[in-house]
Image: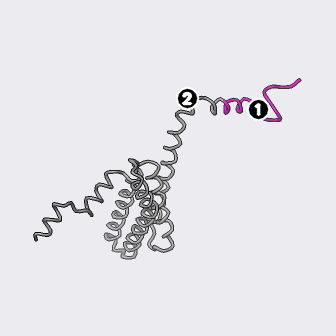
Amino acid sequence: ALDMNWVAGISILPLLAALFCAVNPYLIRISAEVMRDSLFMVLMMSSLALAVWAAGERRTWPWAGFWLGSGVLCALSGMTRNEGSEIVLAVLGWAVFCVILNAVRKENAGTKAVLRGAFIFLVGFSLVAYPSFWYWRSVRSDWTPLDSRIIELVEGFFVLNSDEIAEVGRR
């Protein structure tokens, strides 16, 4: 007699459960949200881990790939969810903390390595985030890979309005 619990040496119950999960409309509906959040968490934590790992070293160049990778992963997490671009602030805050810690310890090599690393991090972030940002801006989309608060901060810092230009011209 054929045992229906086993087919070709494989238990059929897990296969039926997987089939049920694959075709259940309620699970399909919530799966997109779960996938976006899990991807965001992996990218964000990987970016932070690489930055913290690289910041603990006294030499820059062997660890430049870690800094660059951290910046790229940070930009990708920002494209997954807008909150990901705020990791830039966390990594730069960590770099400032390391610089202060190295200054207290009087370790100039560590301070220079962290500052170079933070610059490499920003280069990695910029290489991925800004081309995407300008593309989405050119197609007149409301979506941006960067948090709108950060965009307003940067634009407010670098862009002068007409009143400010007139005031500078009068001086």
Q: Is residue 30 left or right of residue 145?
A: right
Q: Is residue 75 left or right of residue 11?
A: left
Depicted 120 relative to depicted 82: above or below: below
Q: Position of residue 99 (x, y in %)?
A: 34, 68
Q: Which residue is mark 1?
A: 11
Image quadrant occupied by the C terminus: bottom left
> Measuring 40% from the left and 48% from the top, which residue is drawn there?
143
Q: How far apart are the alpha carbons under marks 2 and 1?
A: 26 Å
Please identify the residue farthest to the top as the structure is shown: 1
Q: Mark 2 belongs to which amino acid?
A: Tyr
The circle on residue 72 is: none
Depicted 81 relative to depicted 57: above or below: above
Q: Quadrant of residue 150?
A: bottom left
> Measuring 53% from the left and 33% from the top, which residue is drawn there?
29
- Which stretch did the figure color magenta? 1-19
Q: Which residue is mark 2?
A: 26
Q: Nearer the viewer, mark 2 or mark 1?
A: 2
Q: Mark 1 belongs to which amino acid?
A: Ser
Q: Position of residue 17 (x, y in %)?
A: 67, 30
Q: Position of residue 85 (x, y in %)?
A: 40, 54
Q: Position of residue 39 (x, y in %)?
A: 52, 48
Give the mark nearer the N terminus: 2 vs 1.
1
Residues packed near mark 1 inside 10 Å, few (<14), some (14 to 19) or many (20 plus): few
Q: Is residue 170 left or right of residue 24?
A: left
Please state which of residues 100 and 75 is positioned toward the viewer in this rendering.
75
The kind of secondary structure element at disc 1 is strand
The question of residue 33 being in magenta is answered with no
